Image (cartoon, rainbow, N blue to C red):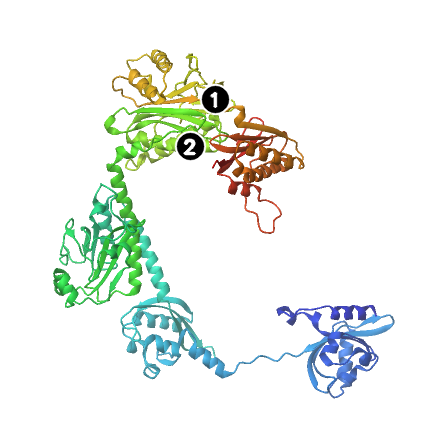
Amino acid sequence: MAAMDSAREASDAPTTAGPRDLLDASTDAAAIVSGDGVVTGWTRGAEALLGHPASEVVGGSAAALVAMPADPARVAAVAARCRAGMGWNGLISARHLDGRTVEVDLRVSASFRIGEQECFLLSARPQRRPVTVDPSVIDGFLTRSPVGMAVLDLELRYVWLNDTLERFGGVPREQRLGHRLSELLPGLQTVAIEGQMRKVLRTGVPITDYEYVGWSWADPHRQHAYSTSFFPLVGADDTVTGVCYMVLDITERWTARRLLTLVNEAGTSVGTTLDVMRTAQELADFAVPRFADFVVVDLLEPVLSTEGHGTWLTDAGPAPARPVMRRAGMSSVREGCPEAVARIGDRVDFLPPPHDATLLIDGDPILIPVLDPADELWASQEPERARSMREWGLHSLVSVPMRARNTALGLTTFVRSLNPVSFQPDDVLLARELVARAGLCVDNARRYTREHTAAVTLQRSLLPQALTGGTAVEVASSYLPADATDGVGGDWFDVIPLSGARVGLVVGDVVGHGITAAATMGRLRTAVQTLADMEMPPDELLAHLDDLQLRLSVEAADDSARPSTATAVLGATCLYAVYDPITRRCTMARAGHPPPVVVAPDGQVSFPEPPAGPPLGLGGMAFESTEIELPENSLLGLYTNGLIGGADRDMEACMVRLGEVLARPAADLAALCTSAVEELVPVPQPDDIALLLARTHALGADHVVSWEVPADPVAVAEARARATRQVEEWGLGELAMTSELIVSELVTNAIRYADGPIRLRLIRDARLTCEVADASSTAPRLRHARSTDEGGRGLFLVAQLSHRWGARYTGEGKIIWAEQEIP
């Protein structure tokens, strides 16, 4: 009975039909029959199959359920087989409760015993009849399939073809049957195609995805690409009786692939130099004869100019009716370009009639599949070109405006004459891509030419145009290049606002002057700004700057085999200082640079000397920083070697002289800076000179307030309330709510994720700053929480509410800060 209960439990379990049911007997109807033919177990599956409930079947004879004539010999043979442990399966007819006969696939297990009684487990499932498809369905599938199909005999004559192939070729089915492909469509690559079919007949090996391009009567004015597969037809005696092929129109795929191939080739052939005219000629040379028989590239005259912006912006308003252009590139399959009515460098204003200059600004490419020289517009507006069309057989045209980066550059025109095929819409896509690629190259070239010509102006822009030290320092600067006509050399200086009302002061000196020194200076200045924004202390900043200079030097050495592209990386020195107006402490480090000069409020002059460190780019040596305290209204001067050095000058004497000049009382810091340079360097020197002066200020106790915060979540409310009261006392009620949220999030994060002690500080400076310090060095991470997350939105909220935020590390841990603009 245990086995019967197990079988019943298995049949009662919910099941899901699926592909495995064909091999899985767990969903079959099951019954247990004793050795004398009495049903002792009956599952719900059996009831579902035959309709008989267990109450009517159990205890009765199993023979009553069989709808077949009695066959005692067969039953005895089945029983003997199962008693031998092999089991049995076969097809029988069973009687349903409603009287109908059910054909079932029956399985009988090897005999087993329940107690003293011999039993057999029977499982059955309905017999599944094979699925058949109506011949009309198969015929419809073959006939209307989107793939063209045909059957040919051993002589390669058509025996059968479907509707799709008839449509592809444009030849009626009646004309195809009994004929060969070469007799019907001579425009196709019939020799090659029939060669492929003969190969299949000879070898019996199928050929798949054979691609070719050709013409058909269905579309005689356009080439189509096809992919064809051939396979042999084999008879009952395994002999080849013919060949079948299937063909698919892949014109769109082939066109896209051709487009991609040509565009990639153009990438290596067009734009090899930074010369506008050369780039235009490369475009013309590339397109002939690959794409067209005659190509002209006309560029707007400002593109070739080195003055002003260089050309039209496409959103700068209406353009003149006839643009002023110059012929920049031209190529033809005919030697000497006899079709042209203008030569390279000539002034032209050609636009395909009836278009005006708006075509260059916002127009689409122009496709004229058939050029008619007798057309009234061409005859009246372009008589010379109409004559050329008649004389040289120019019959199809595509004109593509050349634009790049929202700028109109000119017009490229492709013409066919010897090639009898007219341009099609697919060709316009290719022309657009080629011109777009060349347009970027032309735009790069014109930008380079203009920038190279204006080297002096651009070099000056590398230096800061306006310096501000916020409330921390008052700053002034003076710069004197070694060669006034060359503009700028390699010296630079900068004032960088930092968090917590602090300010970074930097001055650097690149060996040499001119364009190469200015390029190196620009790299280093940008790197210093980036590293300073990452809140690096001075010694670490110089270490990273040293690594950068070393890497640039290695790259330049690797490029030494290509002198035309190599850029020399020169040596450099640098001094970086950070001043904190709250503590009045200044931390500084230097890399081979002269020490700063400090003039105290009482006029006392000193030259603090942090460890010199090696010049940038040597590598392998550490940098050290020094911290000094600056009384309020101290004057800090940073300068380059050109101010105190020179072949005929004593450096120490010049430093003393610099201190004396800066110690003079002066209300105007800018005037003091200028006069210092003029007095120390009265005549031109062979080195660039830079001087940066900073008069320090201090933030009083009425601008800064701080509290210790216990590492307890209940302390968040008190910290929030204190911050809100302080902000309101400062008269910044408009920022009270946002400050409350920022303080809440930063303090909560510190308590939850960091170690104590925790300190909250508010600073009222040019901006309102909230700082939370803790003893952990783990960097905060801004992430976007999912809608189902319960947390993870704190820093995201801080970032949204503040003007800017970040973190900096201290000797005790880190500080997370957030600044708000004061209304």
Residue annotated with mark 1:
586
Residue annotated with mark 2:
529
Q: Could you tell me residue 800's position as x and y percent?
A: 51, 43
Residue 37 visible from this viewpoint? no
Name which quarter of the figure residue 373 lies in. bottom left
Mark 1 or mark 2, whichever is nearer to me = 1
The amino acid type, in three-letter code, at marker 1 is Cys
Q: Could you tell me residue 487's position as x and y percent?
A: 27, 29
User: Please, is residue 808 above or below residue 383 in the view?
Assistant: above
Q: Could you tell me residue 305's position as x and y percent?
A: 21, 43
User: Please, is residue 261 above or below residue 15 in the view?
Assistant: above
The structure residue drawn at horizontal position 80% and vertical position 80%, both measured from the top left corner, is 57
Within-10-Å neighbours for mark 1: few <14, some 14–19, many 20+: many
Secondary structure category for the residue under label 2: helix
The answer to whether 223 appears left or right of 595 in the picture is: left
Q: Nearer the viewer, residue 433 or 736?
A: 736
Q: Could you tell me residue 791's position as x and y percent?
A: 61, 45
The amino acid type, in three-letter code, at marker 2 is Gln
